[in-house]
Image: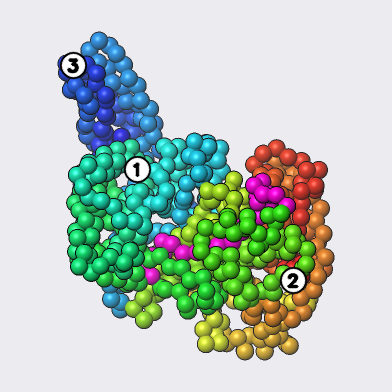
């Protein structure tokens, strides 16, 4: 392994190189190691001797200060340059072993420090000295049979991650340590990795045999993975601190101290100790969620690991109205949250037969592994949308699937935008939220889940929404006490001067009711700042006969009259109460444009949640699930495999909210 580290006091990079060998010889083997990194003008030779058994050669290389070093940056913040390194091991008998590596340079800090006007501590990451807002999701195994996960599948899923403007994935502790290629692709694409060790939601023994096994596991994984710049954090477990602190397992109080002691023995005295012995280039936390330094202060098991003034938080609430942003915690870092939806009908057809195609079928119940999940989805969707009443069971099932995807996408959008706009402010002692990782990115099979990518990689509506709500420059809106607020959110490293354009539409017609343009809006670098506020009543007054039920608001940034970033929208009422919605009579014509396809849409009325689907033809659209306010709009389809216009036309279907009956 090759581990770069930066010595700040002398402003110099070093390379810690460690090579391990299985030595079958019964005698020591002498030789030397030659290291060559041409771009860094490094060419050095070191003597070495391997002892019988497992031999190790370790040495340190100083990178000359006169050689400029290009840094690895997360996606959206810079490039991911790597340096080619060749290491040659030459033994006495002229036996050679040649190894090629990529060497990357970056620093990472987990900052936990006091915040003015707030109790507790911050919890955010600096990459190369720059605070980074973490935007992403949680990764689970991509298949029940890991051997089926090939290079093509890995690249598809990870490319879809950066295509949705994400910069981080948390490798969940209830899954598995991913194969080398997973981390190599993350290095290449600039996807940061929060790496859990594989301990989750359970009590573990601490007898000597088990600890020996754990030590071997942790030592191997850290040695294997520590050279990857994508990995920015080691985490001891998933949810075991909170499980013990809040007694998920109904442990008798007389035995709690024993379990507390076992927890510290496993995650602190063993796992943490091994991590720091093997790798001091990145931070370690004992659990997620955790209160970080406060948990350490309280003996590694905080009284309330969900305390929003410290560390990271997991939060799920399926029963209350997800459109009500005031229900969400305002944590330092949101590392898990989410809502379920069903995958597309074309994905389910692969593993089902006609008698299964009902929301209440045995198949639908069997595929749902979250107790009460199917009912929760309908309950949540029913708060804001009319549920399907069509008698045909297959058509009812398809419409219900579509509604669950709308519900999921809209719920996660509202919660994520709340976290993004909370990054620069403190409200009642809470805030400075610097991470939003929804649960979950990918799926392990075809069934209802929290995933934004279906099994096989097809984008759900949530993933298209994520591309927008994780955009590097974004206006986000919310209401509070009848006042309409818009914040400007930016990941960029410099301030931007833009125009903010607000348009109010009546559901019954496509021409805007009124338009407001505010020039010279300053969106601060790496922050979220309020840029507009007005009472809803005043806004509607300027727009003629608009009411909450009859109108909808869109808003976006502009540069020189052209949209800069995504167009966002704000619903003034539940869509089931919307007045004036008409059948949009959307027509689509498909044509090929080089290596992609163009879908030309024509509509006669405003259409919410327009959904384009091409069945099982692999690929993604440039946008989907959108609010259509134009009479004409072009959408592009980027295929992942060879296809043609005829195949697309045969598989194509289009749905909007007024199709629900």
Horizontal and vertical percent position of residue 53: 21, 24
Q: Is 341 above or below relative to 74?
A: below
Q: Is residue 341 magenta?
A: yes
Q: Viewed as shown, does residue 29 lie left or right of 199?
A: left
Q: Residue at x 81, y 70 (%)?
A: 583
Graded by Cα atoms within 10 Å as few (under 14), some (14 to 19) or many (20 or more), the crowding at tag 3 reads few
Rendered residue at 19%/60% (across/down):
258
The residue that label 2 is drawn on is 389
Mark earlier in primary sequence (1, 3): 3
Residue 105, disc: 1
Vertical order, 198 against 334 (above or below): above
Whole-percent x, y for residue 438 in the image: 48, 61
What residue did someone put label 3 on? Answer: 26
Q: Is residue 165 magenta?
A: no
- Magenta residues, as a range? 331-354
Q: Nearer the viewer, residue 246 or 601?
A: 246
First in residue order: circle 1 vs circle 2: 1
Quadrant the N terminus occupies = top left
Q: Is residue 551 visible?
A: no
Quarter holding the C terminus? bottom right
x, y percent for residue 169: 44, 52
Residue at 62%, 62% in the rendered image: 405
Element assignment for label 2: loop
Determine crowd level at label 2: few under 14, some 14-19, many 20+ residues with C-alpha closer than 10 A. Answer: few
Taking the image as shown, residue 645 lies to the left or right of residue 596, namely right
């Amino acid at each position: 392994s090759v581990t770069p580290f930066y010595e700040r006091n002398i402003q110099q990079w070093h390379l810690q190189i460690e090579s391990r060998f299985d030595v079958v010889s019964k005698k020591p083997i002498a030789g030397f190691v030659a290291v060559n990194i041409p771009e860094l003008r490094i060419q050095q030779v070191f003597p070495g001797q391997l002892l019988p058994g497992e031999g190790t050669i370790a040495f340190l290389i100083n990178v000359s200060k006169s050689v400029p070093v290009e840094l690895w940056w997360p996606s959206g913040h810079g490039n991911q340059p790597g340096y080619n390194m060749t290491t040659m091991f030459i033994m006495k008998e002229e036996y050679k072993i040649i190894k090629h590596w990529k060497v990357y340079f970056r620093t990472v800090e987990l900052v936990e420090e006091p915040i003015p006007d707030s109790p507790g501590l911050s919890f955010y990451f600096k990459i190369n000295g720059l605070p980074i807002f973490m935007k992403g999701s949680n990764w689970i195994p991509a298949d029940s049979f890991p051997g089926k996960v090939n290079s093509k599948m890995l690249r598809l899923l990870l490319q879809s991650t950066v295509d949705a403007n994400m910069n981080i994935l948390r490798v969940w502790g209830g899954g598995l340590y991913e194969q080398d290629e997973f981390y190599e692709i993350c290095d290449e694409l600039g996807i940061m990795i929060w790496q859990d060790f594989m301990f989750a939601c359970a009590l573990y023994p601490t007898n000597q045999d088990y600890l020996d096994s754990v030590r071997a596991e942790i030592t191997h994984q850290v040695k294997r993975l520590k050279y990857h710049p994508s990995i920015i954090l080691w985490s001891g477990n998933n949810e075991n601190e909170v499980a013990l602190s809040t007694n998920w397992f109904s442990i008798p109080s007389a035995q709690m101290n024993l379990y507390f002691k076992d927890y510290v023995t496993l995650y602190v005295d063993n796992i943490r100790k091994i991590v720091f012995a093997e790798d001091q280039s990145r931070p370690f936390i004992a659990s997620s969620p955790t209160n970080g330094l406060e948990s350490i202060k309280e003996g590694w098991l905080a009284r309330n690991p969900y305390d929003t003034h410290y560390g990271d938080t997991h939060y799920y609430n399926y029963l209350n109205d997800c459109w009500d942003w005031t229900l969400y915690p305002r944590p330092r870092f949101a590392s898990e949250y989410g809502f379920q939806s069903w995958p597309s009908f074309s994905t389910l057809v692969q593993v089902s037969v006609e008698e299964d195609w009902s929301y209440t079928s045995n198949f639908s119940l069997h595929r749902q592994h979250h107790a009460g999940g199917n009912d929760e989805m309908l309950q949540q969707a029913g708060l804001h949308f009319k549920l399907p009443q069509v008698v045909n069971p297959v058509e009812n099932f398809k419409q219900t699937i579509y509604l669950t995807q709308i519900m999921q996408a809209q719920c996660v959008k509202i919660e994520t935008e709340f976290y993004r706009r909370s990054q620069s402010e403190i409200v009642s002692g809470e805030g400075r939220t610097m991470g939003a990782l929804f649960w979950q990115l990918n799926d392990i099979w075809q069934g209802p889940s929290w995933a934004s990518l279906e099994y096989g990689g097809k984008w759900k509506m949530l993933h298209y929404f994520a591309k927008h709500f994780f955009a590097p420059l974004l206006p986000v809106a919310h209401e509070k006490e009848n006042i309409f607020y818009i914040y400007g959110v930016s990941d960029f490293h410099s301030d931007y001067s833009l125009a903010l354009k607000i348009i109010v539409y009546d559901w019954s017609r496509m021409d805007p009711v009124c338009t407001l343009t505010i020039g010279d809006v300053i969106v601060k670098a790496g922050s979220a700042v309020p840029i507009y506020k007005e009472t809803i009543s005043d806004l509607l007054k300027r727009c003629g006969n608009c009411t909450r039920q009859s109108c909808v608001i869109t808003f976006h940034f502009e540069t020189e009259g052209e949209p800069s970033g995504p167009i966002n929208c704000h619903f003034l009422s539940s869509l089931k109460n919307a007045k004036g919605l008409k059948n949009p009579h959307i027509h689509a014509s498909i044509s090929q444009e080089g290596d992609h396809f163009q879908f030309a849409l024509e509509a006669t009325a405003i259409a919410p949640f327009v959904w384009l689907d091409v069945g099982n033809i692999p690929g993604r659209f440039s946008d989907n699930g959108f609010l259509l306010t134009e009479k004409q709009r072009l959408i592009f389809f980027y295929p992942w495999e060879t296809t043609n216009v005829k195949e697309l036309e045969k598989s194509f279907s289009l749905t909007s909210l007024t199709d629900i009956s």
